[in-house]
Image: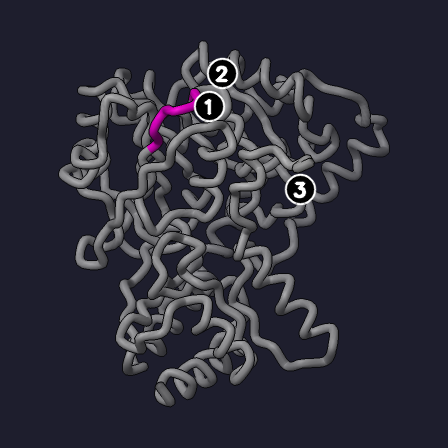
């Protein structure tokens, strides 16, 4: 007898986590591996956030909260969304979840029926299609073009639609490409969604990591009509180096927010109570730490861009956000998994194969690591590419 549920049996494991685990295992064996796989800042969580959680523990804040999270935290999030994103939500429309990954899944599970189609631009974050499949939905992948900066055009959006389309997922700034949609680009996509009454899942987890002249825009801020179709997802992992704290949140139209809260009440219940007090401190504390981290990432971004542009046989689009480069390896003619295995074996450099993001002739480098590691890694990567 097959005991595994069909939907679970059909999903793919996370290659990003697999590569990171493989690199860590080799390092434990004493191998000099340079890892560019991790999707998390290499900084420690700021002390005032840690201290707030410690204080909460000492104060006995170890019991259940409302399933949607502490009211004080949801009030702070409502204020943050209004000030930073020009989004107007009541605390009752906000749900605090166990990481932004959990937020995305809650949003999809609460709205997508079996057979509903969800449009996902590719390259995409690896978990989106698997989440859609888990709820019985159908992921419809739109292959974006490098000449368009890896961003879905209105024409591509329209071509992918059908009478079964329920949702479109927009991730800006994007993982793995670093692409950032402009307000005008979001307006054009939003107009199409409005015309067909299509829900928008807007994953904005990298909003604080935007560089140069680019600006982050929340699609729900463009109009009241778009806000009524948009589920905004964000969290604390990237902006505040809180990946292990597992704190994300959704902000959604009232009925969807109620459905997400009801769903969470029967699954995880509330996110960890004392961690939520750390999140309040993150929102209400000095935001200079976020600016300082972004500035450091930008230095690394520019350095890695210069190195990658000097390597023959690969192509790269300058990322405007997040902390990744998606490198086009098609001129080398090796598919991504084989490429990554050879790169790790020969040069001891760990990167994520692009097949994980729906783009098989690419690999993803994270620059959430020190400049010394980046420099050494680029030396090894350049040597590997010049041999092929």
Q: Is 112 situated left or right of 167 in this image?
A: right
Q: Which residue is mark 2?
A: 257
Q: Nearer the viewer, mark 2 or mark 1?
A: 2
Q: Which residues are magenta?
A: 113-118
Residue depicted at 67% across the width and 81% down the height: 31
- Label 1 secondary element: strand
Q: Is residue 339 above or below residue 200?
A: below
Residue depicted at 28% across the width and 82% down the height: 312
Q: Residue 245: horizontal and vertical position, in percent? A: 67, 42
Is residue 166 shown to the viewer in this render?
Answer: yes
Mark 3 Cα shell of 10 Å, populated few (<14), some (14-19), many (≥20)? some
The residue lying toward the viewer, choosing from 23 and 368, is 23
- Rendering quarter of residue 155: top left
Residue depicted at 59% across the width and 37% down the height: 99
Q: Is 114 situated left or right of 33 in this image?
A: left
Q: Is 35 situated left or right of 294 in this image?
A: right
User: If the image is split into quadrants, where does the C terminus sit?
Assistant: bottom left
Mark 2 in CB contact with mark 1 (< 8 angstroms)? yes
**First of labels 2, 1 by sequence position:** 1
How far apart are the alpha carbons under marks 2 and 3?
Answer: 23 Å
Q: Which residue is mark 1?
A: 251
Q: Which residue is mark 3?
A: 245
The residue lying toward the viewer, choosing from 43 and 335, is 335
Q: Nearer the viewer, mark 2 or mark 3?
A: 2
Mark 2 Cα shell of 10 Å, populated few (<14), some (14-19), many (≥20)? many
Point out which mark residue 90 bears. none
Residue at the limit of the structure toward the left, as seen here = 155
């Amino acid at each position: 007898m097959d005991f595994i549920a069909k939907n679970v049996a059909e999903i793919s494991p996370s290659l990003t986590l697999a590569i990171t685990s493989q690199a860590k295992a080799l390092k434990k064996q004493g191998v000099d591996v340079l890892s560019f796989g991790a999707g998390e800042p290499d900084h420690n969580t700021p002390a005032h956030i840690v201290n707030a959680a410690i204080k909460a523990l000492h104060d006995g804040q170890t019991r259940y909260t409302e399933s949607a999270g502490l009211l004080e935290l949801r009030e702070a999030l409502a204020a943050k969304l209004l000030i930073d994103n020009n989004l107007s939500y009541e605390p009752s429309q906000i749900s605090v979840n166990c990481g932004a990954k959990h937020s995305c899944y809650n949003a999809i599970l609460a709205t997508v029926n079996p057979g509903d189609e969800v449009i996902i631009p590719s390259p995409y974050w690896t978990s989106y299609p698997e989440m859609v499949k888990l709820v019985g939905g159908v992921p419809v992948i739109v292959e974006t073009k490098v000449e368009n900066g890896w961003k879905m055009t209105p024409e591509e959006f329209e071509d992918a639609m059908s009478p079964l389309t329920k949702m479109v997922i927009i991730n800006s700034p994007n993982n793995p490409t670093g692409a950032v949609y402009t307000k005008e680009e979001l307006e054009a996509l939003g107009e199409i969604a409005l015309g067909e009454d299509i829900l928008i899942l807007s994953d904005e987890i990298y909003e604080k990591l935007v560089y140069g002249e680019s600006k982050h825009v929340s699609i729900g801020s463009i109009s009241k009509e778009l806000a009524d179709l948009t589920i905004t997802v964000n969290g604390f992992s990237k902006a505040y180096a809180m990946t292990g704290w597992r704190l994300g949140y959704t902000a959604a139209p009232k009925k969807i927010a109620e459905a997400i809260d009801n769903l969470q009440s029967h699954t995880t219940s509330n996110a960890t109570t004392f961690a939520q007090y750390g999140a309040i401190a993150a929102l209400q504390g000095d935001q200079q730490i976020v600016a300082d981290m972004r500035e450091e990432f930008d230095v690394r971004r520019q350095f890695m861009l210069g190195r990658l542009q000097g390597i023959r046989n690969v192509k790269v689009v300058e990322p405007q956000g997040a902390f990744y480069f998606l490198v086009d390896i098609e001129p080398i003619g090796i598919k991504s998994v084989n490429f990554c295995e050879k790169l790790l074996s020969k040069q001891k450099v760990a990167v994520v194969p692009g097949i994980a993001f729906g783009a098989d002739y690419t690999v993803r480098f994270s620059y959430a690591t020190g400049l010394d590691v980046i420099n050494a890694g680029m030396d090894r990567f350049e040597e590997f590419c010049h041999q092929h």
